[in-house]
Image: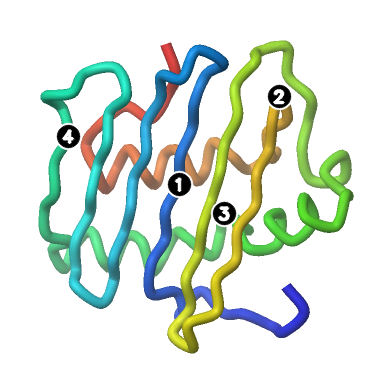
Amino acid sequence: MSEVRNYDNIVVLEVGISSFSGGGFKVKYDFKRNLISWSDGYMWNNNFVKAINSDKRRLIEDRLPNTNMLEWMCAYNEGQCDMVGRKTANPFCWKIEVLFDDDKKYEAVGKQHFPMKWDSLRYLIEDTTECTFRLR
């Protein structure tokens, strides 16, 4: 991410976690359309799309910058994942895609390596979707 990006410029945020067997979860926040989409790889009938109400929007705006998500995404893409994350024994992976208001797209992936501040992002996802964002 060569240019400086701001959390306020995020239009779409998509976060997914999956296991080696393919099960997992994906959440997509579309801030232009005020929608949250949830995809459950374990239970096909647990998928949904719902509106982002003003309380959840405020929660995201307040807490997303504190996750340092953009900063650790950059570190992972630059090969500095050990500075911002830790290796795990679990064969899980994560993927984050961000679309900014200037149509620039940014993504990062981690396999068996999770950012130290992953839990702060996970808690934010759980608080805004009311679903558990942990692999089984």
Count residues near mark 3 (Cα–Cα under 10 Å), then give few for <14, some for 14-19, many for 20+. Answer: some
- Report the residue at 49% width, 26% height from top: 18
**Camera-nearest residue between 133 and 55:** 133
The reply to whether callout 4 and callout 3 are in contact (CB within 8 Å) is: no
Which amino acid is tagged 2?
Gln
Residue 67 numbered mark, or none = 3
Front position among marks 2 and 3: 2
Residue 118, compared with residue 1, is above or below; it is above
Quick one: SS at disc 2? Answer: loop
Residue 112, compared with residue 15, is above or below; it is above
Q: Earlier in the sequence, mark 4 or mark 3?
A: 4
Q: Quadrant of residue 12?
A: bottom left
Front position among marks 3 and 1: 1
Which residue, given by chain and number where applicable, does mark 4 sit on? 47
The reply to whether callout 4 and callout 2 are in contact (CB within 8 Å) is: no
| Quadrant including the N terminus | bottom right
Which residue, given by chain and number where applicable, does mark 2 sit on? 112
Which amino acid is tagged 1?
Val
Quick one: SS at disc 4? Answer: loop
- Report the residue at 41% width, 25% height from top: 24
Count residues near mark 1 (Cα–Cα under 10 Å), then give few for <14, some for 14-19, many for 20+. Answer: many
Q: Earlier in the sequence, mark 2 or mark 1?
A: 1
Q: Earlier in the sequence, mark 3 or mark 1?
A: 1
| CA separation in Å, label 4 and label 3 | 25 Å
| CA separation in Å, label 2 and label 3 | 19 Å
How far from the left and from the top, in percent, is residue 14?
A: 42, 53
- Report the residue at 43% width, 23% height from top: 134
Q: Earlier in the sequence, mark 2 or mark 3?
A: 3
| Quadrant including the C terminus | top left
